Amino acid sequence: MRNPFADTDRRCIEAIRRAAHVFADLERPDLDPVVEHIGAAPLVLLGEATHGSEEFYRLRAELSLRLVVESGFDAVAVEADWPDALRASRYVQGSDDAADADAALGGFMRFPRWMWRNTAVRDWLERLRAHNLALPQGAPRVGFFGLDLYSLQASTQAVIDFLERSDAPGAAEARRRYRCFDGYVAEPQHYGAATHFGLAPDCEQAVLQQLQALFGRVAQRAAVDDPLAQDELFYAQQNARVVRNAEAYYRTMFDGRTDSWNLRDAHMAETLELLRAHLSQRLGRPAKIVVWAHNSHVGDARATESADRGQLNLGQLVRERDTRDETDSPYLLGFTTHTGSVAAAADWDEPVQRQAVLRSREDSVEQLLHGSGLGDFFLPLDGEAAWTLERPRLERAIGVIYRPDTERQSHYFRAALAQQFDGVVHIDETHAVTPLDPSTLWQDAGEPQLAPTGM
């Protein structure tokens, strides 16, 4: 069947060729055009089309280090759990006794552990630590923080541990409140099912009371002119906030995807805003933060079909909050790929595999970018390139699970790329990131096969 958009596609490809900045060497990519296009944006959100592509991790690391060194960025916040990322942050800031980055990533033990326990992240943490340790004595060090809310068990324990060091009666009270989760804390989805079906009382009031306690009596006791103590209090308060929002997330996950999705992305946006406020207070100036998360969280949801389902996301919330001041506007950078391989599981809680990624569909934005023949490049989504990519097209999203046999239904959605992002990096062929703990199923993926067009 003839592509009804063939003429439009040809004009789009011509415009893409004129506007794109080609990466001649991915080992040493010229990121100057990306840095220049980002400009003075104080929040830079870096996406990824998959949770398991080496090139996405490496390019985000390279760009983040450029922003840290040249533009004075203060932290990297990622789609990861707060307590696990905090352990890695202590290592890169030189305040943890971990032997190396591999050990510092030891907190990432739950599925999908390869998402952060991989060689690309390990190497990135070592580079960030080297940068921090080379700073002058007393200079603020760049941190590495988590934005997610899945860490119910680790965060409840972190709150209790903090209180045991600073307020023994408060620790006892926290243990009493969190006892509401007994039998469920290690498997919080079971808590969600039990409360949804009326088999157990919910813990909403208990976790809210504990959060309020950390902002009240304990906060007053810790209000001293010690920056490290202020940091530790903020970290504990954030763990209590994670517990509060995780409780709500697991309680609503059986009510439908939209409610739990919105709660999770609202939590990430809230965490980012609070982290920025905390760092700004410590620095005496507005803090600058880089974010790493999937395209589905970074790209403005209002430009995708998910908006029709009432779903919002981090990129949308950040834009809505920060465009009140044009000088404070965030920058959203998407990443796409045409084919290659990816580290992903066949289903939830199953082992990671190196899977072949099907070539992009004929009716997708990835195929359009591939059709430019430029290979790997950065495309600013303004000027001529913007109008060429305003029409909604299919766009691929591969998370921690990849199902090639149902790829159209499982991994494609409609989106207007030029409204989703401020720029996009296209890597024509990507390769699976290497897990630090490969499974017995880790093997060569074989050659990717052509996907049916579905036209």
Image (cartoon, rainbow, N blue to C red):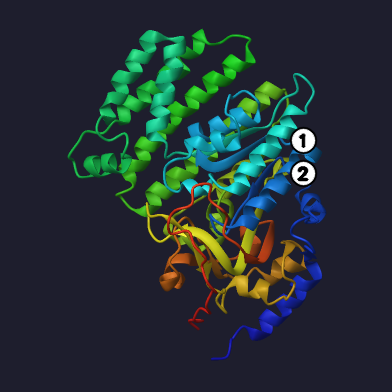
Q: Where in the figure is residue 172, as x and y percent of width and height?
A: 33, 13
Residue located at (62% from left, 11% from top): 226
In the picture, the disc for residue 66 is 2
Q: Amino acid at mark 1?
A: Gly
Q: Quadrant of residue 52?
A: bottom right
Total labels: the figure holds: 2
The first of marks 1 and 2 along the sequence is: 2
**Front residue of this view, candidates 414 and 137:** 137
Q: Where in the figure is residue 23, as x and y percent of width and height?
A: 77, 62
Q: Quadrant of residue 189?
A: top left
Q: Is residue 49 above or below residue 266?
A: below
Residue linked to disc 1: 72
Is 16 positioned to the left or the right of 430 in the image? right
Q: Is residue 319 visible?
A: no
Q: Is residue 306 above or below residue 211?
A: below
Residue located at (77% from left, 54% from top): 34
Q: Where in the figure is residue 324, as x and y percent of width and height?
A: 66, 42
Is 5 positioned to the left or the right of 253 in the image? right
Residue located at (77% from left, 56% from top): 29
Disc 1 packing (10 Å; few <14; some 14–19; many ≥20): some
